[in-house]
Image (cartoon, rainbow, N blue to C red):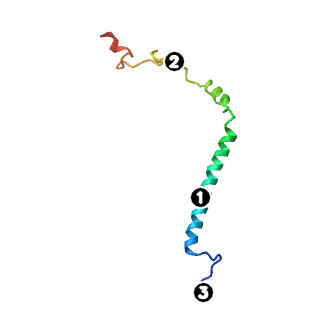
Amino acid sequence: MRTGSSILAIAQGDAVALTMMALLGFALGMILTILIVMARHAGRKPDVTGELEGDEDDATPRTRAGEPPAEPRDEWEREPDWWKDR
């Protein structure tokens, strides 16, 4: 008689093969799921209009490059184009 109880009677050699088949099935299922999700969302365009509208309401004024900032400078700060005078 056997002293241990087992739910399934599987030989040791078959357990390794069944485990590998289960992992392979899981991996293929994950890849299939990813491909299906990608196929479903391939035709959709992202809705960025709501995100872009929020950028227009920024409190900071936009300045072009090279323009001095709006706040006054301290005495020790140089002008941005100090190197051009040479």
Q: Quadrant of the N terminus?
A: bottom right
Residue 82's image quarter?
top left
Which dot, 1 or 3, sits closer to the camera?
1
Give the number of the disc on residue 73: none
Q: Position of residue 5 (x, y in %)?
A: 62, 82
In the image, residue 66 sits, relative to residue 10, either above or below, namely above
Tell me if label 1 and label 3 are in contact, CB under 8 Å. Answer: no
Total numbered badges shown on the rendered structure: 3
Q: Where's the C terminus, which quadrant?
A: top left
Question: Which amino acid type is marked by label 1?
Answer: Leu
Q: In the figure, residue 19 lies in which quadrant?
A: bottom right
Crowding around mark 2 (Cα neighbors within 10 Å: few <14, some 14 to 19, many 20+) is: few
**Residue on which the image places disc 2:** 63
Q: Earlier in the sequence, mark 1 or mark 3?
A: 3
The residue beneath circle 1 is 24
Q: CA distance from mark 3 to mark 2?
A: 84 Å
Which amino acid is tagged 2? Thr
Q: Amino acid at mark 3?
A: Arg
Q: Secondary structure at mark 2?
A: loop
At which x and y percent is residue 31?
61, 50
Q: Secondary structure at mark 1?
A: helix
Name the residue located 34 percent from the left edge and 12 percent from the top edge.
84
Q: Is residue 85 left or right of residue 26?
A: left
- Judging depth in this view, the residue of 8 and 61 nearest the camera is 8
Residue 11 drawn at (x, y percent): 58, 75
Question: Which residue corresponds to mark 3?
Answer: 2
Give above or below for 78 relative to 19. Answer: above
Q: Residues within 10 Å of mark 3 (few under 14, many from 20)?
A: few
39 vs 17, nearest the viewer: 17
Q: Residue at x 63, y 79 (%)?
A: 6
